[in-house]
Image (cartoon, helix red, strand yellow):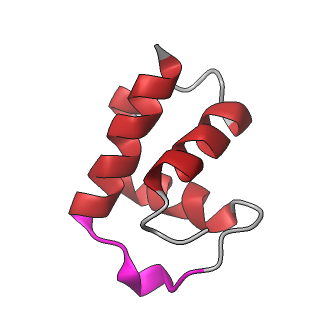
């Protein structure tokens, strides 16, 4: 997975952290959790606020 795979990342985060409300996650924590996902292999420095926000929004949709 790469940073641009926001939906895949969101699904994995939802499965690994089912008790977390993504509306309240800090982007620093989100970045760390994404980097720790199995199958994630992208440069940590390629993320930015826009990408993290897109992941957060997709995760919120998965949580509904």
As for residue 36 lying within the magenta part, the answer is: no
Left of 35 or right of it: where is 64? left
Residue that lies at the very extreme toward the right in this rendered image: 38
| Image coords of residue 17 (percent x, y) | 66, 33
Q: Residue at x 56, y 51 (%)?
A: 9
Q: Residue at x 51, y 86 (%)?
A: 43
Q: Is residue 37 visible?
A: yes
Dividing the picture into quadrants, the one containing residue 60 is top left
- Which image quarter: residue 19? top right
Which contiguous range is marked in magenta? 42-49
Whether 25 is drawn above or below 36: the answer is: above
Q: Quadrant of the N terminus?
A: bottom right
The residue at 77%/62% (across/down) is 38
How many labels were placed on the picture? 0
Q: Residue furthest left?
A: 50
Residue 20 locus on image (x, y percent): 55, 26
Q: Position of residue 64 (x, y in %)?
A: 46, 13
Q: Can see residue 21?
A: no
Q: Is residue 3 left or right of residue 40?
A: left
Location of residue 22 in the rendering, given as x and y in whole percent from the top left corner: 43, 31
Residue at the (61%, 33%) spot, across then down: 14
Figure check: 58 above or below 49: above
Compared with residue 6, is residue 43 higher up or lower down, i.e. above or below? below
Residue 43 against residue 57 in the figure, above or below: below
């Amino acid at each position: 997975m790469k940073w641009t795979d926001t939906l895949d990342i969101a699904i994995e985060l939802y499965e690994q952290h089912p008790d977390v409300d993504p509306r309240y996650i800090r982007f620093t924590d989100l970045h760390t959790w994404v980097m720790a996902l199995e199958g994630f292999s992208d440069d940590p420095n390629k993320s930015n606020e826009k990408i993290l926000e897109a992941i957060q929004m997709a995760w919120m949709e998965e949580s509904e």
